[in-house]
Image (tube, rainbow, N blue to C red):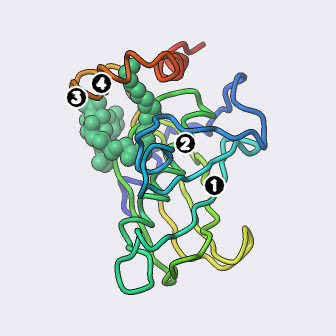
């Protein structure tokens, strides 16, 4: 693991937000057109994550023929996306919006088309806006062999990060959607 992914002295253990979804509760999609979790992306991953105890989540994603790199095998970038999306959903438990700053991925075993990837992620430390987290993807069940794993650094941002940087067409549509608004704003009301 590179030094950028090692929590500095002074980093704190993560604190589960009191209003975090209960363990077992599905987190839902943060954006309908998200390639990782959105229902409105025909070739997306349709990853479904749920809250766990502590500051952790689990998720599943089934590799389809749309996700190939080599014949019959998942593309590494798609597997990294699945890890990234699972890690990104940890924000629900901290109740902050965070984007990936760094993602370091180990590809341990090839993952064939048709495989259900069982993902699990947890926050390991927090330092200011920096959120340190780790994830694994297993095949054959939640306790199966590790196929991919990642360490990551997420950076907390405000909703303005998206409003200021996103293409106006999609931002305006998202802002007109009360559900997206509600979800995005809920994260900004921190204790
Ligand atoms: C109503 C409107 C609708 C809105 C609806 C929105 C709902 C959304 C809800 C939830 C979204 C979740 C989406 C999940 C999707 C899965 C996750 C992804 O794929 S996210 C996409 C990929 N990532 C990016 O696009 C980031 C691009 N990068 C940036 O924008 C900036 O670089 C950013 C924000 C990450 C940091 O920029 P700075 O200017 O804010 O902050 P600085 O000062 O540079 O960094 C803060 C600290 O972090 C360290 N840092 C930053 N990047 C680092 C890196 N790559 N490696 C190591 N350290 C890094 C810095 O050294 C600094 O550390 P020190 O506080 O000084 O100790």
Front residue of this view, candidates 43 and 36: 43
Q: Ligand 1: does it lie within 8 Å of the C-beta at label 2?
A: yes
Given contact means CB atoms under 8 Å apart, are the residues at marks 3 and 1 in contact? Answer: no
How far, Cα to Cα, is label 2 from label 1? 10 Å
Q: Earlier in the sequence, mark 4 or mark 3?
A: 3
Q: Does 44 appear above or below 108?
A: above
Given contact means CB atoms under 8 Å apart, are the residues at marks 2 and 1 in contact? Answer: yes
Q: Residues within 10 Å of mark 1 (few under 14, many from 20)?
A: many
In what quadrant of the picture does the C terminus appear?
top right
Q: Residue at x 65, y 79 (%)?
A: 145
Front residue of this view, candidates 119 and 7: 119
Would you say 65 lies left or right of 123 here? left
Q: Which element type, helix, strand or loop, lies under badge 2? A: loop
Would you say 182 lies left or right of 106 here? right
How far, Cα to Cα, is label 3 from label 1? 28 Å
In what quadrant of the picture does the N terminus appear?
bottom left
Q: Which mark is residue 165?
A: 3
Q: Is residue 45 visible?
A: yes
Q: Is residue 154 visible?
A: no
How far, Cα to Cα, is label 1 from label 4? 27 Å
Q: Earlier in the sequence, mark 2 or mark 1?
A: 1
Question: Where does label 1 land, which residue?
Answer: 59
Q: Does 178 appear above or below 111?
A: above
Would you say 157 lies left or right of 136 here? left
Q: Which element type, helix, strand or loop, lies under badge 3? A: helix
Q: Which element type, helix, strand or loop, lies under badge 4? A: helix
Which label sits in the foreground, 1 or 4? 4
Question: Where does label 4 land, which residue?
Answer: 171
Q: Residue at x 56, y 15 (%)?
A: 190
**Residue 150, percent from left and from top:** 48, 63
């Amino acid at each position: 693991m590179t030094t950028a992914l090692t929590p500095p002295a002074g980093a704190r253990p993560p604190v589960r937000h009191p209003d975090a979804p209960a363990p077992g509760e599905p987190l839902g999609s943060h954006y309908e057109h998200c390639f990782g979790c959105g229902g409105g992306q025909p070739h997306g991953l349709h990853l479904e994550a749920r809250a766990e105890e502590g500051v952790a989540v689990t998720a599943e994603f089934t590799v389809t023929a749309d996700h190939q790199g080599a014949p019959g095998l998942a593309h590494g970038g798609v597997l990294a996306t699945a890890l990234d999306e699972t890690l990104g959903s940890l924000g629900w438990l901290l109740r902050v919006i965070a984007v990936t700053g760094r993602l370091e991925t180990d590809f341990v075993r090839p993952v064939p088309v048709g495989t259900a990837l069982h993902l699990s992620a947890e926050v390991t430390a927090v330092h200011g806006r920096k959120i340190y987290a780790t994830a694994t993807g297993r095949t054959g069940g939640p306790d199966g062999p590790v196929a991919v794993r990642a360490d990551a650094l997420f950076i907390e941002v405000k909703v303005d990060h998206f409003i200021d940087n996103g293409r106006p067409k999609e931002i305006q549509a998202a802002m007109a959607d009360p559900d997206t608004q509600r979800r995005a704003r809920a994260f900004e009301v921190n204790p």
